Image: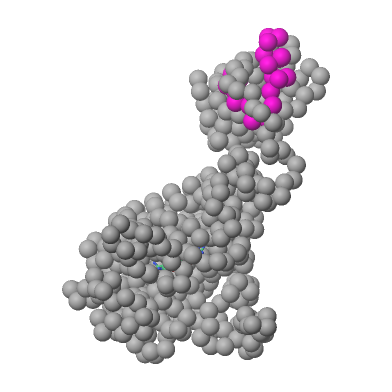
Amino acid sequence: MWVYIDKISQYVGQEITIKGWLYNIRSSGKLMFPELRDGTGIIQGVVSKKEVSEKVWEDFSKLTQESSVIVTGTVSQHPKKENVFELQIKELEIVQISEPFPITPKEHGIEFLGDNRHLWIRSTRQAAILRIRNEIIQSVREYMYNNGFILFDTPIFTPNACEGTSTLFSTDYFDLGKAYLSQSGQLYAESGAMALGKVYTLGPTFRAENSMTRRHITEFWMMEPEMAYYDLNDNMDLIEDFLEYVVQRVIKNKAGDLGILQRDISKLEKVKKPFPRITYDEAIEILRKKDIALIKKTSEGEEQIRPFPWGEDFGAPHEEAIVEDFDKPVMVHRWPVQAKAFYMKRDPENRDIALGVDVLAPEGFGEIIGGSQREDNYDFLLERIKEHDLPLEEFQWYLDLRKFGSVPHSGFGLGIERLVSWICNLEHIREAIPYVRRPNRIRP
Ligand code: 4AD
């Protein structure tokens, strides 16, 4: 009977078959200890010279790392370790003897691993991260489905910008001129919310940012809910409830894989609502107290501006300083209008303020969510589109949403790879997606 390694505990004492690959093998005289992997996990096998045929013994001696094998044996409980199982092997079928595998248990340089990403993903750590990513996306979808959100898939080819014209990838689109790869599905999701009440979109988005930080990639997956009749506070209530659900579910269902990554789960267990909510003004107070400067690039190099000036967006050092004293995600709300996108609603009580919210992950992982209440007034929105010099004709349909039964509405965007990086405690976002795209990497 073919069994996957992650289900092996149900088969103690039974004879089963595993179809997979040889991860590693040790031998000591009359015993061999092959480690087998099948994508769901790793199990140690025991081959005893006196228990198997001569052919099986010899075949095992021939195996190289990553050879594909079908192995049959009896599942046993590890003599010392609870919840660890072994396979007392009887039969071996070799599917292919692997050529020397380029990635060995020794250390490799990061460029080498990136060039060999198609093989690197087989390593224990990478496979664990990708299984956690799967659990995260599944949790996101389930939360949305269970809470009445309708999946509303938005297009990737678009004729206009959502998040600023400086980061658009363009391509030729038949006789219709230029098409741009979507930076965000939000504008379309807003139309969906007016049709269906609560919607979400989850798909790849693109930013032509020539930025080589540990948190930026040019192609990333974003989940964007959009809700009619939600104001900024409703939006923040949703963010809290949603993040708590996803994080708590992942630590419950993926304890094994988080263990492989040596993730300190006690830190994630604290992610329970309510989350701290601070205004932008309170956030810059923190920066000023800690004397963290704004760093501006100039022709001569860098300039440090103190105290941190009102109106500027935060970079990584600022985000780290703001969350330092909290052990939960921090919601920074009410931003200077000039630091935020054209579609955000202005605070009716202070026109310099946009009703936006950024969510900063704890432990210095930076912004994982950006959201806002949207401008729902036709004239104000038109003014903002003109101020940002956006092509009016491409925004007519978007303005229509403010003509035909306009309502207050809000939404947010969650970067999946940023969330994966935080939950998995990754040094660099490149490990959070099967194939990373950055300014200096498009292969494999
Ligand atoms: O703050 P952003 O740009 O917001 C939007 O795109 C809105 N339209 C979302 C909305 O309200 N529906 O991006 C949202 C999130 C960020 O918080 C971050 O997690 C992620 O998307 N993100 C990136 N992730 C990886 N690499 C990049 N270059 C990213 N840019 C944004």
Q: Is residue 163 visible?
A: yes
Residue 128 vertical placement versus 360 (above, below) = above
Q: Is residue 373 magenta?
A: no
Query: In the orientation shown, which residue stands out farthest toward the front?
Result: 175
Number of numbered callouts drawn: 0
**Residue 414 left/right relative to 271:** left
- Residue 57's spot in the image, x, y percent? 71, 14
**Residue 394 left/right relative to 80:** left
Q: Residue at x 55, y 35 (%)?
A: 39
Q: Residue at x 74, y 45 (%)?
A: 107
Q: Residue at x 45, y 84 (%)?
A: 338
Specify the quadrant of the image occupied by residue 349.
bottom left
Residue 225 vertical placement versus 249 (above, below) = below
Query: In the orientation shown, which residue stands out farthest toward the right?
Result: 29
- Residue 420's spot in the image, x, y percent? 54, 55
In front of the other: 442 or 191? 442
- Residue 97's spot in the image, x, y percent? 64, 23
Q: Is residue 256 visible?
A: no
- Residue 233's spot in the image, x, y percent? 39, 75
In front of the other: 432 or 327? 432
Which residues fall within the magenta stretch? 53-77
Q: Residue at x 60, y 86 (%)?
A: 308
**Residue 156 left/right relative to 331:** left
Residue 417 vertical placement versus 31 (above, below) = below
Which colouring convention does the figure follow? one colour
